[in-house]
Amino acid sequence: MDSLAAWFDRYPDATVDLAERMGQIFWQTRQDREKVRNFFIDYQDRLLYGTDLIDNGTSTPEELIKKIEDIWLRDWQYFVTGEAMKSDLVNEPFQGIQLPKSVVDKLFFQNAQRVFGF
């Protein structure tokens, strides 16, 4: 978070997505939940929710849909609740960061709408 915050401060027009970074976010949340929560609030206009899910052709369409849904729901739970959570991306439990609805709306939709112009 510190490196990205410094980068955002240096490049005030930059926006990044969270694709394949949830494990690092969960890990940092274990270290200092409030710091991570504050980061998302402070830089709420600069972050997009995204994933880098890969279909290597071995899943059925139903299996792939289930995988996508499970990952999305896990990440959604992390952002919108303060519940205790587990993930195969980190070794120990962590707690969701319970962001305000306005911040979650930006992460999951409004920032992408602004950046991609749809």
Image (spheres, helix red, strand yellow):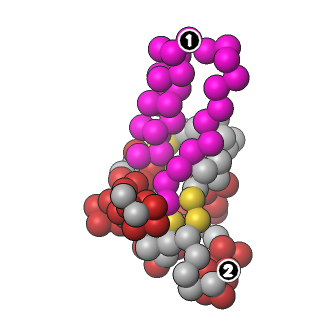
Q: Residues within 10 Å of mark 1 (few under 14, many from 20)?
A: few
Most extreme residue toward the left is 101
Q: Is label 2 or label 1 in front?
A: 1
Q: Are marks 2 and 1 in contact (CB under 8 Å)?
A: no
- Please tell me whether mark 1 sits on a helix, a strand or a loop: loop
Residue at 54% across / 21% down in the picture? Answer: 64
What's the residue type where badge 1 is placed?
A: Thr
Residue 78, horizontal then vertical, whole percent: 45, 49
Residue 1, horizontal then vertical, whole percent: 64, 70
Residue nearest the observer in this picture, 44 or 15: 15
Residue highlighted by disc 2: 7
**Magenta region, residue range:** 48-76
Residue at 44% across / 73% down in the picture? Answer: 45
- Tell me if I can see residue 53 in this picture: yes
Q: Quadrant of residue 104?
A: bottom left
For the residues marked 2 and 1, what is the alpha-carbon distance in whole angstroms?
Answer: 40 Å
Residue at 70% across / 23% down in the picture? Answer: 56
Residue at 66% across / 73% down in the picture? Answer: 4
Please say if 1 is above or below 72: below
Residue highlighted by disc 1: 60
Residue 117, horizontal then vertical, whole percent: 40, 63
Horizontally, is 27 left or right of 15 in the view? right
Quadrant location, the C terminus: bottom left
- Please tell me whether mark 2 sits on a helix, a strand or a loop: helix
